[in-house]
Amino acid sequence: MANKYKGFLIVSTICLLLLGYYQFTEYRAWWSFPLYDDGLRDGEVGDKVIIMAKLAVEDTSWVAEHLSDWQHAIYTVNDPFSRLHTSTNKGHESLAYLTYIISHYHSLPSTLLFLHAHRSGRRRGWHTDAWDWDNVRSVKSLNLSYVQKEGYVNLRCNWKPGCRPQDYTPNGHVSKQIWLEVLGPGSNGTEDEVPEMVGQPCCAQFAVSKMQVKQRPLEDYISYRQWVLDTELEDEKSGRVMEFLWHVIFGKGAVFCPEPSACYCNLYGRCDGVL
Ligand SMILES: *[C@@H]1O[C@H](CO)[C@@H](O)[C@H](O)[C@H]1NC(C)=O
Ligand SMILES: *[C@@H]1O[C@H](CO)[C@@H](O)[C@H](O)[C@H]1NC(C)=O
């Protein structure tokens, strides 16, 4: 009798351990995004570039260290003596983004990834949609063939802020007048064509294919940059305007809010449906 119980105990302990292990790996799957394999050999640099704006005090060595399979174009916005810099510090990251496109328009790599200068951590990275708000993880999981297929993706799937109805009905940063100033008049040149609502998830981290960039002539990007240089809006406000217009510039409708669980699945291969 006693032996029978012993056997039962051993079997149930093993079952519990297996169940625990399964739960643990499930949990890991929940917070870690599977890595995307883009077929590069070790040490190879791909046909893809990370574009970034940084302040002189910011340390971006994490990019070369952890994302060495990407080309880098890191612009210092407040140091005219650094190798890559913007002509002035305005429009937050937007001048660096536009300056890269304008200078490389005729020799772009296939994938362009626009990122902020901080790597991780909640305080500065709260808007990065990955474990520990970590851009390295987010970039390593990003499905580059999906980017090619879509043309433009916002790296943030979470709708807060930017895609909640209160964020874009109307969008407090992009008025009709601002839309017309930046993008120019539409085909009939009147305000009637300007959408009432403009929205996408916040924070200006996104990926674009070369093909999508080329859907617009170089002159368009030059004129957006001129708007940033000329506007009387202060740095942060002009940055916000561009933040809520990138998706329009890159061919999406005025409100571009993919359903979050589909977004996590398509962008990061995280298809478990858990948000
Ligand atoms: C990446 O995206 C492509 C295009 O949508 C899809 O066919 C492929 O299965 C995805 N790969 C992974 C690893 O999720
Ligand atoms: C301009 O286009 C909008 C939207 O297509 C239309 O509603 C409006 O009547 C047009 N205005 C003129 C003056 O043609």
Image: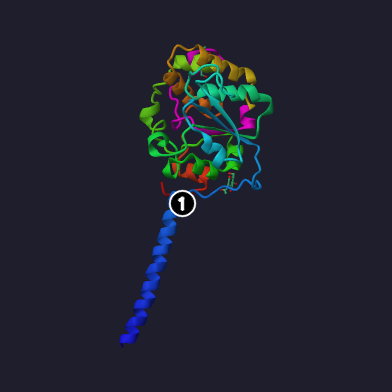
Secondary structure found at label 1: loop
Q: Is disc 1's CB within 8 Å of ligand 1?
A: no
Q: Nearer the viewer, residue 59 or 242?
A: 59
Position in image of residue 47 (x %, y %): 66, 37
The amino acid pointed to by label 1 is Asp
* Few, some or many residues within 10 Å of mark 1 (<14, 14–19, 20+): few
Q: Residue furthest right?
A: 106
Quadrant in which the N terminus appears: bottom left
Q: Is residue 72 visible?
A: yes
Is residue 186 among the parts visible in the rendering?
A: no
> Where residue 201 sits in the image (x, y, percent)?
44, 33
Is 192 rendered above or below residue 2?
Answer: above
Depth check: 125 or 142 in front? 125
On the image, the x and y values in percent for residue 135 come to: 49, 39
Q: Is residue 159 above or below residue 32?
A: above
Residue that appears at 64% across and 20% down: 218
Residue at screen point 38% across, 28% down: 167
Reply yes or no: does residue 66 show up in magenta: no
Q: Residue furthest left?
A: 2
Q: Residue at x 65, y 46 (%)?
A: 40
Instruction: Specify the farthest residue to the bottom.
Output: 1
Q: Position of residue 213 (x, y in %)?
A: 61, 28
| Label total for image | 1
The segment highlighted magenta reads 187-213
Q: Is residue 117 left or right of residue 12?
A: right
Q: Which corner quadrant of the image does residue 4 belong to?
A: bottom left
State yes or no: residue 197 in magenta. yes
Q: Residue at x 42, y 19 (%)?
A: 237
In terms of depth relative to the viewer, which is nearer, 178 or 187?
178
Q: Which residue is mark 1?
A: 272
Residue 146: which quarter of the image? top right
